[in-house]
Amino acid sequence: MRGAVDAFRAIDTEPYGVNQSDAASHLAFIEEQQLPFDLLIDDGLHVARAYDALKPEGKSINRTVVVIGKDGRIIYRASGAPAPEEIIAAIAEVEDE
């Protein structure tokens, strides 16, 4: 994702990471990984639960990519770390509709 941020922004899409860690942990991770996007805190795992992104035990987040359209509709969802090109193609497909 880090290397594809400019491609996402070129199609008016802003990536974010979401997990349950605190702000200090997020800032350290952003610096360590040199991330060019923000990480949001999911205190209580409410966001992960809403997007069906919890691991089976329900206590931590399963890496999941969710793209939400400007109308609030989910236009792409995949577990794991799909290739940025796959995500961008899904966004382009919706924009062509």
Image (cartoon, rainbow, N blue to C red):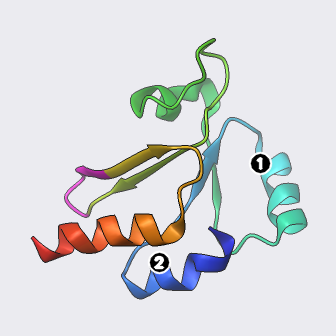
Q: Is residue 6 above or below residue 79?
A: below
Q: Quadrant of the N terminus?
A: bottom right
Query: What residue lies at 58% left-to-right and 44% top-to-bottom?
Result: 80
Name the side, left or right, on which 33 lies relative to 81. Answer: right
Query: What residue lies at 79% left-to-right and 63% top-to-bottom?
Result: 30
Q: Is residue 79 above or below residue 72?
A: above
Q: Name which quarter of the figure residue 6 lies in.
A: bottom right
**SS category of the residue bearing label 1:** helix
Q: Nearer the viewer, residue 22 or 83?
A: 83
The secondary structure that most of the magenta stretch takes on is: loop
Other residues around mark 1 within 10 Å, as few (<14) / some (14–19) / many (≥20): few
Query: What residue lies at 37% left-to-right and 80% top-to-bottom?
Result: 12
Q: Amino acid at mark 1?
A: Ala
Residue 94 is inside the magenta segment: no
Q: Please tell me the numbered disc located at residue 40.
A: none
**Residue 4 image point, x, y percent:** 58, 78
Name the side, left or right, on which 40 lies relative to 90. Answer: right
**Residue 74 image point, x, y percent:** 28, 49
Q: Name which quarter of the figure residue 56 lies in.
A: top right
Residue 74 is inside the magenta segment: yes
Q: Amino acid at mark 2?
A: Phe
Q: Nearer the viewer, residue 28 or 59?
A: 59
Location of mark 1 (residue): 23
Q: CA distance from mark 1 to mark 2?
A: 24 Å
Q: Please tell me the numbered disc located at residue 8.
A: 2
Residue extent of the magenta highlight: 70-75
**SS category of the residue bearing label 2:** helix
Query: What residue lies at 14% left-to-right and 76% top-to-bottom?
Result: 96
